[in-house]
Amino acid sequence: MLSTCKLMFLLAAARALRGKTLRRPATRLRAASDWSALGLSPEIAALAAAHWAAPNAVQEASIPLLASDDGGDAVVGSETGSGKTLAYLLPVADVARGARAADAGAAPSPYPRALVLVPN
């Protein structure tokens, strides 16, 4: 049974969408042939390849952007079980690995290097 708050939200959303057409993605994504083609370091690409044969469409679309030097903030939207968490975490692991090697002997930073928020 829906709570009153959830029911009110659903009704408001239905009213807002009444008469509007929702867009579908214009293109279908295809899976990359291997992890190393996504811009990850060879070590992280090998780690991923040891557990997953090839990246899926969500990972192929997001990992190159997240692994680039521009990095920055990103929101990846896809259905549950599509591989979004791995798409976020592989570039984060890659950056953390590189930063750890660069900071060898230096005092650890008190600031986080990445923040991944997920719904519960």
Image: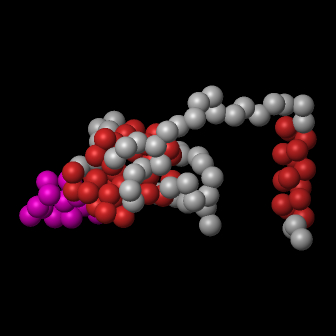
Where does residue 48 sit, x and y in percent of width and height?
33, 58
Observer able to see residue 66: no
Q: Vertical placement of 23 versus 94: above or below? A: above
Would residue 72 appear left or right of 93 to someone viewing this image? Answer: right
Name the residue rendered at 31%, 41% in the picture: 37
- Image quarter where the N terminus lies is bottom right
Colouring scheme, one of rainbow, by chain, secondary structure, one colour: secondary structure
Where does residue 87 sit, x and y in percent of width and height?
44, 52
Would residue 105 appear left or right of 95 to someone viewing this image? Answer: left
Would residue 108 appear left or right of 118 to someone viewing this image? Answer: left
On whether residue 105 falls in the magenta region, the answer is yes
Name the residue rendered at 50%, 44% in the picture: 57
The residue closer to the viewer here, 32 or 78, is 32
- Image quarter where the C terminus lies is bottom right
Would residue 2 appear left or right of 104 to someone viewing this image? Answer: right
Observer able to see residue 34: yes
The residue furthest bottom is 1
Total count of labels:
0
The majority secondary structure of the magenta stretch comes to loop
On whether residue 92 falls in the magenta region, the answer is no
The residue furthest left is 105
The boundaries of the magenta stretch are 96-113
Instruction: Tell me which corner region of the image, top left, top right, bottom left or bottom right, holds residue 72.
Output: top left
Where does residue 59 sit, x and y in percent of width and height?
45, 47
Instruction: Tell me which corner region of the image, top left, top right, bottom left or bottom right, holds residue 44.
Output: bottom left
Where does residue 55 sit, x and y in percent of width and height?
42, 50
Name the residue rendered at 88%, 44% in the picture: 14
Name the residue rendered at 16%, 64% in the picture: 107
